[in-house]
Image (cartoon, helix red, strand yellow):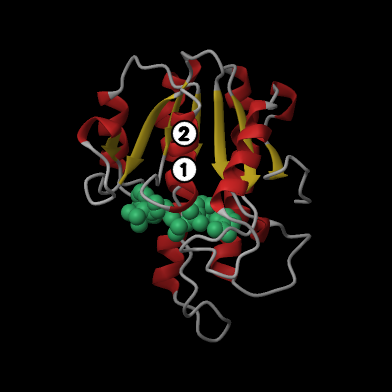
Amino acid sequence: MPTVLVTGASRGIGREFASQYREAGWRVIATCRDPEGAGYKNSDAFELDVSDPVSIKNLANLLAGVPIDLLINNAGINRAKHANFGNLDYDAWDEVMWVNVLAPLRVAECFATHVAYSDLKQIVFLSSIMGSIEDNSGGMPIYRSSKAALNQAVRSVAPELRSKGITSLLIHPGWVRTDMGGPNAAIDVQTSVSGMRETIAALTPVMAGSYVNYDGKPIPW
Ligand SMILES: NC(=O)c1ccc[n+]([C@@H]2O[C@H](COP(=O)([O-])OP(=O)(O)OC[C@H]3O[C@@H](n4cnc5c(N)ncnc54)[C@H](OP(=O)(O)O)[C@@H]3O)[C@@H](O)[C@H]2O)c1
């Protein structure tokens, strides 16, 4: 069975990815900042703080030689407070860029060899429609700019990843009822993740570096 590694698997979308792939018989490497606190038993999850380069390198070394068919860069944050013009929180902006942009790229770099060893060779990045410049009606510059930067960065490295046989994808999970999406969001985690799993299962190398909705429909950049 294939192996999937998920970042930010403590709750929300990441936790649901881990649970649905496990249910489907995959080997799941669930990672989060505090596996025990998230209710995982010892062998089920690994500690990974994506904002800490040492933490990423340590896990990549620990898993050296383990093929990872699908790497899901899911961990992300949205510091919504003080995100309006005239009241911008630059420390929060720095933190969001670090976690939402630099961290997933660093995780992809550190685990590219593991992915290249595998059969499927796929890296998925949780983006957001909020990263679309064409779709932008204003507001939330911190979060939006982080996802737009993630889009640009992933699109930029897609050809290099493809030369290693790795297919990358930017995916919007929908507006999902999680801590981040809030209780009024449009869909539940089960719907979002089962939709994304279908889209990922249909992923082919020609789609490398594309930006799609959870149901596979392209999103304007
Ligand atoms: N929900 C939506 O409507 C929506 C829409 C568009 C895009 N997204 C994207 O989808 C992804 C998942 O969102 P979600 O709704 O599931 O969010 P969530 O419920 O807030 O969960 C976020 C996850 O990211 C983890 N995380 C945050 N910082 C981390 C770090 N430094 N190291 C490791 N893990 C870290 C959290 O772990 P802790 O428990 O340790 O904090 C948690 O597991 C994010 O990238 C988000 O931007 C969500």
Tags 2 and 1 touching, CB below 8 Å: yes
In the rendering, at what x and y percent does residue 65 appear? 34, 14
In the rendering, at what x and y percent does residue 167 appear? 62, 26
Q: Residue at 32% of width from left, 28% of height from top? A: 60
**Mark seen at residue 108:** 2
Q: Local crowd at mark 2 within 10 Å, few (<14), some, or many (≥20)?
A: many
- Image quadrant of ligand 1 equals bottom left
Secondary element at tag 2? helix
Question: In the image, is residue 115 above or below residue 35?
Answer: above
Total numbered badges shown on the rendered structure: 2
Q: Is residue 31 left or right of residue 175?
A: left
Query: Label 1: which residue?
Result: 104
Q: Local crowd at mark 1 within 10 Å, few (<14), some, or many (≥20)?
A: many
Query: What is the three-letter code of the residue carrying label 1?
Result: Pro
Q: Residue at 73% of width from left, 39% of height from top? A: 216
Query: What is the three-letter code of the residue carrying label 2?
Result: Ala
In the rendering, at what x and y percent does residue 55 appear? 27, 40
3D distance between C-alphas at marks 2 and 1: 6 Å
In the rendering, at what x and y percent does residue 169 appear? 63, 36
Q: Residue at 36% of width from left, 49% of height from top? A: 10
